[in-house]
């Protein structure tokens, strides 16, 4: 089977990593021919490193983008794919109106966000990243909905295949320090509150515990984050928080961690290393991954919504409890890694996705006049068909270690 993978752009982040690793696994393990169609960005080297071919897509300046739809149709004429695999909403809109409706090409959608959007056409085969969101999609009448858990390459994301000594030496991490690691974009939506609360927790606990937070990532909020980190360091009288900047390959950071704080794919990678994990979210959500919470996180995803309390007690309690167990419960690390290997490993997810593709080609969705009208009406009502000012280059390519949404895996710190 020949597949064109359509991604919005090749930014640093969980969705980008997932799409590239899955594409390579589909080729290597299941014999599919895979070509990428995406706007170039810092992760295009990862595409090439995996031996995948990239067809550069133009920057989308409108939503939908006539220019990108024209380029997509040209790629389809040149490549003659059997199927178009689309990641997230913006590429889905262009693929639906630019390829599925006029050409009848089967379009298969993967949406890893934490909620169902009505902007996705109902007629297309669509995967969702948690059982909870899948249940919501089916309840909304999306009969072609499927579960696809976010994949983790558990072979390379392991202590066995990752060195951490150089990373710890580079950032002068001493043996007596408890090293907290967060890999995240420094942007506004979703991630801002959790990052701000993490800095506050280090400030509150830093006299009690020898905490050292290494914040791996970059983005528009870096200067504000650095300012707040400096205030915490001044308050504690030592360098307790360090911003390392972006890392295209952050595996050494995970390996160096004593405790990882994060969400989405970043949380799963932490578990692949067998690391103690505190899962972050919005409105003050913070919870440890344990044997007791594993089933809940599997159902809802590695993310949560708290009660909105101003208190940072949940996060502080989770960090204190995780720190207190360091070196005393090695079986939790073994449980964590086994949890990821059995359900989220790249091999398991790629096998499932290959089966989905075969079933989609055996029962391809027809162009539905009702779905076309419904989707057009909804997008017009929501003013989705509009000019979108392109982000400046420095904003377009941002770092992230996770993704509970499209384009990897953002922060308001004010």
Image: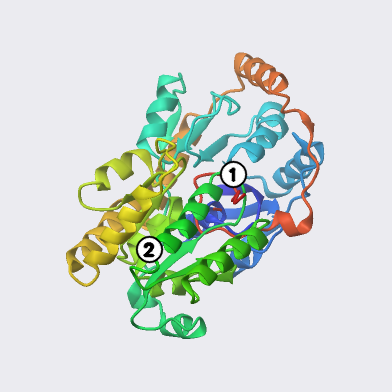
Q: How is the image coloured?
A: rainbow
**Dot 2, how many residues are within 10 Å of its Cα: few (below 14), some (14-19), or many (20+)?**
some
Report the Cα–Cα distance between label 1 and label 2: 26 Å
- Residue 164: horizontal and vertical position, in percent? 41, 80
Instruction: Establish if 86 lies above or below 224.
Output: above
Mark 1 or mark 2, which has the lower sequence index?
Answer: 1
Observer-nearest of 12 and 371: 12
| 168 relative position to 184: left or right | left
User: In this view of the protein, which residue sits in the foreground, 370 or 2?
Assistant: 370
Query: Looking at the image, which residue is at 68% across and 26% down?
Result: 101
Asked whether, in this view, residue 98 is left or right of residue 200, the answer is right
Give the number of callouts: 2
Q: Secondary structure at mark 1?
A: loop
Disc 1 and disc 2 in contact, CB within 8 angstroms: no
Q: Position of residue 259 (x, y in %)?
A: 35, 65
Q: Is residue 137 above or below residue 396?
A: above
Q: On screen, 413 above or below 84?
A: below
Place of residue 221 in the rendered image (x, y in percent of width and height, measured from the top left) = 65, 56
Q: Residues within 10 Å of mark 1 (few under 14, many from 20)?
A: few
- Which dot marks residue 115? none
Return the x and y of residue 66 as percentages of the image width and height.
80, 36
Where is 331 relative to 351, above or below?
A: below
Asked if residue 121 can be seen in this view, the reply is yes
Q: Secondary structure at mark 2?
A: helix
Residue in view at x 45 percent, y 74 percent: 252
Q: Which mark is residue 205?
A: 2
Quarter-of-image position of residue 148: top left
Q: Is residue 29 visible?
A: no
- Residue corresponding to mark 1: 189
């Amino acid at each position: 089977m020949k597949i064109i993978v359509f991604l919005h752009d090749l930014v640093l982040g969980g969705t980008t990593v997932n799409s590239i690793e899955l594409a390579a696994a589909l080729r290597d393990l299941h014999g599919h021919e895979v070509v990428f169609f995406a706007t170039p960005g810092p992760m295009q080297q990862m595409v090439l490193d995996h031996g995948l071919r990239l067809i550069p897509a133009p920057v989308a300046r409108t939503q939908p983008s006539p220019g990108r739809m024209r380029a997509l149709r040209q790629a389809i004429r040149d490549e003659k794919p059997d199927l178009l695999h689309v990641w997230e909403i913006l590429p889905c809109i262009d693929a639906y109106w630019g390829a599925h409706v006029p050409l009848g090409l089967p379009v298969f959608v993967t949406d890893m966000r934490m909620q169902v959007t009505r902007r996705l056409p109902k007629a297309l085969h669509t995967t969702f990243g948690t059982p909870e969101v899948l249940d919501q999609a089916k309840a909304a009448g999306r009969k072609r909905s499927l579960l696809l858990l976010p994949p983790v390459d558990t072979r390379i994301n392991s202590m066995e295949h990752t060195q951490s000594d150089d990373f710890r030496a580079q950032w002068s991490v001493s043996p007596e320090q408890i090293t907290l690691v967060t890999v995240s974009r420094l942007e506004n939506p979703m991630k801002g509150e959790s990052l701000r609360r993490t800095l506050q927790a280090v400030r509150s606990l830093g006299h009690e515990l020898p905490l050292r937070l290494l914040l791996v990532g970059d983005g528009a909020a870096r200067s504000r984050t650095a300012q707040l980190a400096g205030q915490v360091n001044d308050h504690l009288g030592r360098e307790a928080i360090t911003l390392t900047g972006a890392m295209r390959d952050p595996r050494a950071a995970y390996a160096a961690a004593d405790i990882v704080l994060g969400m989405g794919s970043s949380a799963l990678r932490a578990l692949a290393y067998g690391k103690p994990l505190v899962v972050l979210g919005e409105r003050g959500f913070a919870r440890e991954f344990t044997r007791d919470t594993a089933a809940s996180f599997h159902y809802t995803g590695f993310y949560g919504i708290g009660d909105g309390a101003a208190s940072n007690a949940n996060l502080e309690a989770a960090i204190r409890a995780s720190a207190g167990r360091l070196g005393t419960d090695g079986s939790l690390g073994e449980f964590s890694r086994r949890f990821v290997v059995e359900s989220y490993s790249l091999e398991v997810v790629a096998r499932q996705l290959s089966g989905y593709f075969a079933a989609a080609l055996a029962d391809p969705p027809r162009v539905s006049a009702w779905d076309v009208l419904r989707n057009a009406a909804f997008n017009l009502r929501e003013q989705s068909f509009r000019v979108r000012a392109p982000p400046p280059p420095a904003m377009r390519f941002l770092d992230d270690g996770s993704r509970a949404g499209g384009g990897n895996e953002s922060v308001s710190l004010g």
